[in-house]
Image: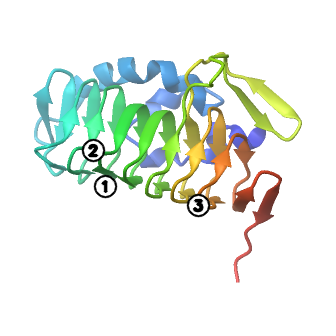
Amino acid sequence: MEICEIRNLFNLKETIAAALFEGAVYPWEVLPKIGAFILELGPSLPAEEYDQAGENIWIAKSAKVAPTASITGPAIIGKNAEIRHCAFIRGNAVVGEGAVVGNSTELKNVVLFNKVQVPHYNYVGDSILGYKAHMGAGSITSNVKSDKKLVVVKCGEERIETGLKKFGAMLGDEAEVGCGSVLNPGTVVGPRASIYPLSSVREAVPADSIYKKRGEVAQRYEI
């Protein structure tokens, strides 16, 4: 299932966590490793560029963090990132350079590549968001199946058993998720794909496509 491979989803030059993906084929393989990776990388970050703001929390000096934000380690907040009012970062989180984590947005066990925007009432858990990926207001990742079974990634007739109980979504570079959408466990959205507002997605969406509803996915054409 090539559309779900790391090499076809992300530009690894756009994350401080590039080494985390070494040796992996699919991005969800690294989800259980995020916390340990941060604990290893954090102490090596240059003191002239990052402050250690608490136990296992490293925040770039150029980042803007609202006094009302809550951050629990392990966490790395990258250069020029913006953590807004009442953001809730629950740990095992890498927030990329220039990324925006907005009002009342909650993060848990995630990697946000550079310039990701989750700016308004989003929940992002057990997920990876590629360079310039954007989630519209109120859109969320659902990271546990209602029957609590292990997550399977689906693309047409193909299936990949992930072995994971918790798995939200993988968003490729410059993916756009419309307001109020739910990305169900095992969702993969290809680079530059767009998800219509109020969608419920539970499959792999090809790159450069427009997801209107299940069974209706159009190819994007540049004019």
Q: Which residue is disc 1 drawn over?
A: 98
Q: CA distance from mark 2 to mark 3?
A: 29 Å
Q: Check the image and name the residue furthest to the right.
A: 157
Front-lying residue, 7 or 144: 144
Q: Nearer the viewer, mark 2 or mark 3?
A: 3
The 10 Å Cα crowd at callout 3, few under 14, some 14 to 19, many 20 or more, is many
Looking at the rendered structure, which numbered label has been put on residue 197? 3
**Which amino acid is tagged 1?**
Gly
Left or right: residue 220 compared with residue 34: right
Q: Please tell me which residue is depicted at 23% across the width and 54% down the height of the picture.
A: 80
Rendered position, 22 above or below 177: above
Rendered position, 168 above or below 33: below
Residue at disc 3, secondary structure: loop
Circles 2 and 1, Cβ within 8 Å, touching? The answer is yes
Rendered position, 20 above or below 173: above
Circles 2 and 3, Cβ within 8 Å, touching? The answer is no
Q: Please tell me which residue is depicted at 46% across the width and 47% down the height of the picture.
A: 13
Q: Please tell me which residue is depicted at 68% across the width and 21% down the height of the picture.
A: 162
Rendered position, 20 above or below 120: above
Q: Position of residue 77 (x, y in %)?
A: 26, 40
Front-lying residue, 141 or 60: 141
Q: Which residue is disc 2 drawn over?
A: 78
Q: Please tell me which residue is depicted at 28% across the width and 37% down the height of the picture.
A: 88
